[in-house]
């Protein structure tokens, strides 16, 4: 049985171990911290539980949903989502709702937004390489300034025009025309088999005791199968020879050196750290690429407040530039058991920083003071209501997508591919802005690669489809059971038939031939029948066909004109039908794309 060593017990590392255990291999996980879960951990402070941010569990990858269900079962709750934006002393629903935004911004601002949106759609910027251009092209300059710029810059710490448009394109896929039309024609409310289609924007899964519960459970499941997760060991060196890693070296929390060999190695360490840990070191060019990679750091100030209810949202985006915090989480609204006493509320104030920022070095007391001041300034609490507080700092929370990162990642990737038994996966492991689901999927792929599959972990979340709809079985009301939406085949057929283009030339010829033959046949039948007055009714057609009469010469004259007129009508009908269907499809796709981008801030 092959031994596999995994660096990191976050979602990716633990998922890799879990999958390997199913495949009959022998994984061991080494974790630097004294807690598992990585960025998806839950911290427990005097009975108050909180996340690093708020971790929604949602995925369109059935395999990942199955894994979550399998691990947590009845503790995997479905929670409603409520979130708003705080801006100019007002709260705006998020995802944005037209009436609510209009009421908050006033008619003049709304008109200016409309004008700038129209301008952006009519005259989009041709160059769309940075985030600012990407958003302005889709929302207009004014909406971008009001609802996207401040928050995005708080999170990333760099101007929006220095952020690569890659992540937006990666996390917000345009729907295919086919998908959009399907939704428009067959509705996104109820599918043909009676299942309710629900959008993951409105609700999400969440472990009863926070995201860390999932990863603690995973660790326990691994232990029950005899696989160890060693906490407090930071991997610092990977010794390799002839394209194979032989050993991982680490230091335990009590200072002892740990040396472990294995047949295969999986790393979820930040890509830069992995490269710098290789022994012997890689070529200079690879080292340089690793050193170019940047990470955004994060800290959360958690305030325990003596009040039962402060606001109903799960979280609020803080766009107000006068405060440093970017978002506030209200953990009891994620799961009621996140607080030990229901008469209390815990607020998680999120600050996005660089390690070199002075605030990063501030003492816990000073940060708590800042948090209280800022919450008071925006009118959420009174300072006297705060009875306790704590701070959690998390380095390398976000792999930065600046204008140079792709080149660096490519260089590193090419180099790492020369190793026969080393794979790097996960969020920082691939320097990819992945949520848990995609981080986990890369881990599953890596595990399966060890038993002979050939999956490309780098393609996850760049080439995969990423849709936000799931089916919820109406018989399992307490559980989100997402699967890829696979509309009934009839829907596909109806769309194909309804949207098939007509050939105007063929339609014209067909109608011309039919019209001319029918008229010629009717005229000759009447002529052959004879009588005192031949074809008085048909003769009325001379109103349409100049010089037509029910005579032998009229029959040929009518044949020619009906052929021409029928051709013109058929051609025009086909052309108009094609044009209106194209216009309809365009509008449907635009509106579907707008819906898809409706939660852009969630993805920042
Ligand atoms: C503020 C915030 C909000 C988020 N919200 C969501 C959300 O709502 N939904 C969602 O699905 N995802 C969310 N995410 C993303 C999610 O946290 C990550 O996708 C996920 O945790 C990545 O898992 P990972 O195992 O790749 O990396 P990590 O979670 O970073 O875990 C890596 C682990 O490796 C350990 N490690 C690192 N170096 C070493 C070393 N040298 N030796 C040993 N161990 C090491 C670390 O200590 C850590 O435990 C959010 C992230 C942030 C920062």
Image: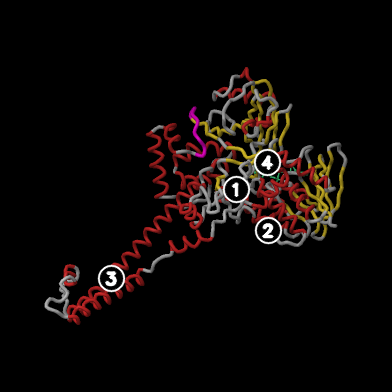
Return the disc, 4 or 1, that comes first in the chain's sequence.
4
Label 2: which residue? 456
**Quadrant of the picture in which ligand 1 is shown:** top right
Return the disc, 3 or 2, that comes first in the chain's sequence.
2
Question: What is the distance, in whole Å, between disc 2 and disc 1 at their CAs?
Answer: 32 Å
Label 4: which residue? 76
Is residue 547 something one can see in this rendering?
A: yes
Query: Is residue 212 positioned above or below 311 on the image?
Result: below
Taking the spot 53% from the left edge, 46% from the top edge, the residue there is 131
Return the disc, 1 or 3, that comes first in the chain's sequence.
1
10 Å crowding of disc 3: few (<14), some (14-19), many (20+):
many
Residue 408 percent location from the top left of the image: 65, 52
Q: Secondary structure at mark 2?
A: loop
Q: Secondary structure at mark 3?
A: helix
Q: Residue 460: which quarter of the image?
A: bottom right
Is residue 290 something one can see in this rendering?
A: no
- The span picked out in magenta is 88-95
């Amino acid at each position: 049985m092959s031994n596999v060593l995994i660096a990191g017990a976050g979602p990716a590392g633990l998922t890799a171990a879990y999958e390997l255990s199913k495949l009959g291999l022998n994984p061991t996980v080494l974790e630097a911290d004294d807690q598992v879960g990585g960025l998806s951990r839950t911290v427990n402070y005097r009975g108050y539980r909180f996340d690093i941010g708020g971790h929604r569990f949602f995925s369109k990858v059935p395999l990942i949903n199955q894994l979550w269900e399998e691990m947590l079962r009845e503790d995997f709750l479905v929670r409603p989502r409520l979130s708003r934006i705080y801006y100019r002393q007002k709260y705006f629903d998020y995802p944005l709702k037209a009436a609510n935004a209009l009421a908050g911004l006033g008619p003049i601002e709304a008109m200016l937004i409309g004008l700038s949106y129209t301008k952006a759609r009519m005259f989009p910027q041709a160059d769309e390489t940075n985030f600012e251009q990407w958003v302005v092209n889709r929302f207009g300059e004014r909406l971008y300034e009001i609802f996207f710029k401040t928050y995005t810059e708080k999170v990333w710490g760099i101007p929006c025009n220095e952020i690569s448009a890659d992540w937006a394109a990666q996390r917000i896929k345009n729907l295919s025309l086919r998908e959009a039309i399907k939704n428009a024609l067959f509705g996104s409310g109820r599918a043909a088999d009676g299942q309710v289609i629900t959008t993951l924007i409105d609700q999400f899964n969440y472990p009863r005791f926070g995201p860390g519960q999932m990863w603690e459970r995973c660790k326990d499941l691994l232990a029950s199968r005899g696989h160890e997760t060693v906490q407090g060991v930071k991997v610092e060196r990977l010794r390799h020879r002839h394209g194979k890693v032989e050993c991982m070296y680490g230091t335990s929390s009590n200072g002892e050196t740990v040396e472990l060999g294995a047949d295969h190695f999986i790393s979820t360490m930040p890509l830069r750290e992995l490269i710098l840990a290789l022994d012997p070191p890689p070529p200079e060019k690879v080292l340089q690429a690793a050193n170019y990679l940047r990470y955004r750091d994060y800290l959360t100030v958690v305030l325990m407040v003596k009040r039962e209810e402060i606001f109903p949202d799960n979280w609020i985006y803080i766009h107000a530039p006068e405060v440093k915090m970017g978002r506030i989480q209200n953990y009891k609204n994620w799961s009621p058991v996140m607080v030990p006493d229901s008469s209390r509320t815990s607020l998680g104030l999120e600050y996005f920083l660089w390690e070199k920022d002075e605030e990063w070095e501030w003492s816990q007391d000073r940060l708590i003071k800042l948090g209280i001041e800022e919450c008071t300034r925006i009118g959420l609490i009174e300072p006297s209501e705060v009875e306790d507080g704590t701070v959690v700092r998390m380095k390398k929370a976000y792999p930065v997508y600046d204008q140079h990162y792709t080149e660096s990642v490519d260089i590193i990737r090419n180099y790492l591919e020369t190793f026969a038994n080393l794979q790097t996966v996960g969020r920082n492991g691939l320097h990819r802005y992945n949520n848990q689901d995609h981080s986990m999927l890369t881990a599953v792929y890596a595990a399966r690669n060890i038993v002979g599959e050939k999956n490309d972990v780098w393609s996850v979340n760049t080439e995969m489809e990423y849709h936000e709809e799931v089916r919820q079985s109406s018989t399992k009301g307490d559980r989100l059971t997402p699967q890829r939406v696979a509309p009934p085949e009839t829907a596909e057929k109806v769309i194909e038939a309804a949207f098939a283009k007509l050939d105007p030339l063929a339609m014209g010829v067909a109608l011309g031939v039919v019209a001319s033959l029918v008229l010629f046949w009717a005229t000759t039948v009447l002529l052959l029948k004879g009588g005192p007055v031949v074809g008085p009714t048909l003769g009325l057609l001379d109103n349409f066909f100049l010089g037509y009469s029910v005579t032998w010469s009229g029959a040929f004259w009518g044949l020619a004109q009906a052929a021409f007129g029928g051709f013109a009508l058929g051609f025009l009908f086909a052309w108009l039908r094609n044009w209106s269907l194209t216009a309809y499809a365009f509008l449907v796709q635009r509106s579907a794309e707008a819906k898809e981008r409706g939660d852009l801030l969630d993805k920042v």
